[in-house]
């Protein structure tokens, strides 16, 4: 979906925000929260040290990758400061950046990022990583989603199956967070791609607000389909929080979820924040992203390097992978299906040097 050109952000000038529990901005989509969080969800580094800058982001904070990067950055700069993470989805993180509530924003909507840059107040300092969206659902697959049929056909199958769930499932066949996040607006674009009108209330499509992780756990418990992202899925698998939900559709440019680091060039200059934002695109960070999550599950990394074959000792040590993961871990990087048993592609977040498009 194309961004709303007014974006409400030009009306908000630096200095208008008060650091309270939340601030409120307009959003014209029904059900989307207008409240922007302004308090820290986590502190990275020694909390007794002064806060150097605040980092705005949504889902990546829950995977632990932000803590790793921030704490490494703090140590590499000699310490003596800490960094706060303020949890908001992408559009709210941009507004928080405009108001200097945060000094670095990691966001997932390139069109909105480009709009902010065109307005003259934002600068993209680095492309940090590429995650991918995933359609997950109950292992019983009541809608009969074809794992080889693509995302549009999968959503059509879910919509066509609504009559069954109207009578047999009060928790809904499909869950949406309905929160104005990058995931939510990507979901709306995918429904549009599938030529399914979800502008009116559908009994089979229920709104379940929450973080990406919370939404995934709820869908798992209630047997619903959901659009989530690889990093969140693997994090929940690591935590053994999922029992019933498996991936059906993933990969390809339609489901790319790129993350960029933005700074506000109109706000008072925070040199360390800008250094951090630029550093996120460095080879050093890309190597950290590639290796993050290395010991999770069957030893896969949470980052994607592409084109690698797994060492023989991997299979000797870990044996065959969980079959529920196979469709999730392959296919988006033109990996041959014959390579699936060797797990040559099994990454959730992609280092941008390896997958920039």
Image: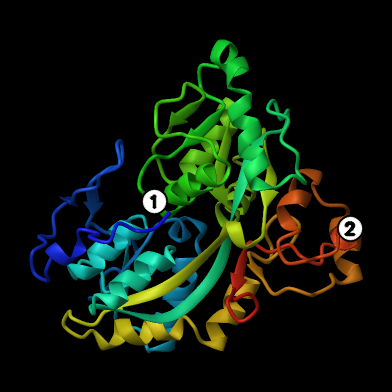
Image spot of residue 139 (x, y percent):
72, 32
Quarter of the figure with residue 162: top right
Which residue is at 54% across, 31% downward? Answer: 174
Which residue is at 36% across, 43% downward? Answer: 179
Vertical position of residue 75 compared to residue 58: above or below: below
Which residue is at 58% across, 47% downward? Answer: 236
Identify the residue position indicated by label 1 in the image.
181
Q: Is residue 201 visible?
A: yes
For the residue pair 342 and 318, the one nearer the viewer reads as 342
Identity of the residue furthest to the top in this view: 167
Q: Residues within 10 Å of mark 1 (few under 14, many from 20)?
A: many
Answer with mark 2 or mark 1, whichever residue precedes in sequence.
Answer: 1
Vertical position of residue 270 compared to residue 244: above or below: below
For the residue pair 77 and 223, the one nearer the viewer reads as 223
Q: Is residue 18 left or right of residue 9?
A: left
Q: Residues within 10 Å of mark 2 (few under 14, many from 20)?
A: few
| Element at label 1 | loop
Q: Quadrant of the C terminus?
A: bottom right
Q: Is residue 75 left or right of residue 204?
A: left
For the residue pair 59 and 142, the one nearer the viewer reads as 142
Alpha carbon distance from label 2 to label 1: 35 Å
Q: Is residue 117 left or right of residue 279?
A: left
| Element at label 2 | helix
Image spot of residue 99 (x, y percent):
17, 67
Which residue is at 23% across, 84% downward? Answer: 270
Quarter of the figure with residue 46: bottom left
Quarter of the figure with residue 271: bottom left
- The label nearer to you, 2 versus 1, is 1
Identify the residue position indicated by label 2 in the image.
341
Image spot of residue 350 (x, y percent):
61, 70
Q: Is residue 139 left or right of residue 170?
A: right
């Amino acid at each position: 979906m194309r961004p709303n050109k007014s974006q409400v952000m030009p009306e908000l000038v630096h200095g208008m925000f008060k650091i309270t529990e939340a601030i409120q901005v307009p959003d014209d989509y029904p059900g989307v929260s207008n409240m922007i969080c302004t308090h820290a969800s986590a502190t990275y580094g020694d909390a007794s040290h002064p806060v150097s800058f605040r980092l705005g982001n949504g889902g990546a904070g829950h995977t632990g990758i932000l803590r790793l990067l921030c704490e490494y950055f703090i140590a590499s700069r000699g310490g003596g400061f800490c960094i706060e993470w303020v949890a908001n989805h992408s559009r709210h993180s941009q507004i928080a950046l405009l108001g200097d509530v945060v000094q670095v924003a990691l966001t997932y909507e390139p069109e909105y990022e480009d709009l902010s840059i065109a307005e003259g107040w934002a600068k993209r300092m680095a492309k940090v990583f590429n995650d991918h969206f995933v359609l997950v659902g109950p292992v019983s697959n009541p809608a009969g989603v074809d794992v080889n049929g693509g995302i549009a056909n999968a959503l059509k199958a879910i919509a066509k199956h609504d009559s069954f769930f109207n009578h047999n499932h009060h928790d809904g066949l499909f869950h949406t967070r309905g929160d104005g996040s990058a995931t939510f607006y990507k979901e709306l674009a995918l429904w549009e791609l599938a030529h399914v009108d979800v502008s009116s209330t559908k009994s089979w499509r229920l709104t379940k607000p929450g973080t990406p992780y919370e939404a995934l756990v709820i869908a798992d418990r209630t047997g619903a389909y959901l659009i989530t992202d690889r990093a969140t899925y693997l994090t929940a698998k690591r935590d053994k929080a999922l029992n019933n939900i498996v991936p059906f559709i993933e990969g390809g440019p339609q489901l790319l979820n790129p993350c960029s680091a933005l700074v506000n060039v109109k706000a008072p200059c925070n040199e360390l924040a800008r250094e951090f934002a630029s550093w996120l695109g460095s080879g050093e960070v890309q190597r950290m992203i590639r290796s993050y999550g290395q010991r999770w599950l069957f030893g896969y990394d949470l980052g994607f390097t592409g084109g690698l074959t797994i060492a023989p000792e991997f299979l000797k040590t870990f044996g065959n992978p969980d079959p529920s993961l196979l469709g999730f871990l392959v296919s988006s990087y033109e990996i041959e299906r014959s390579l699936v048993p060797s797990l040559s592609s099994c990454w959730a977040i992609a280092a941008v040097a390896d997958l920039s498009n």
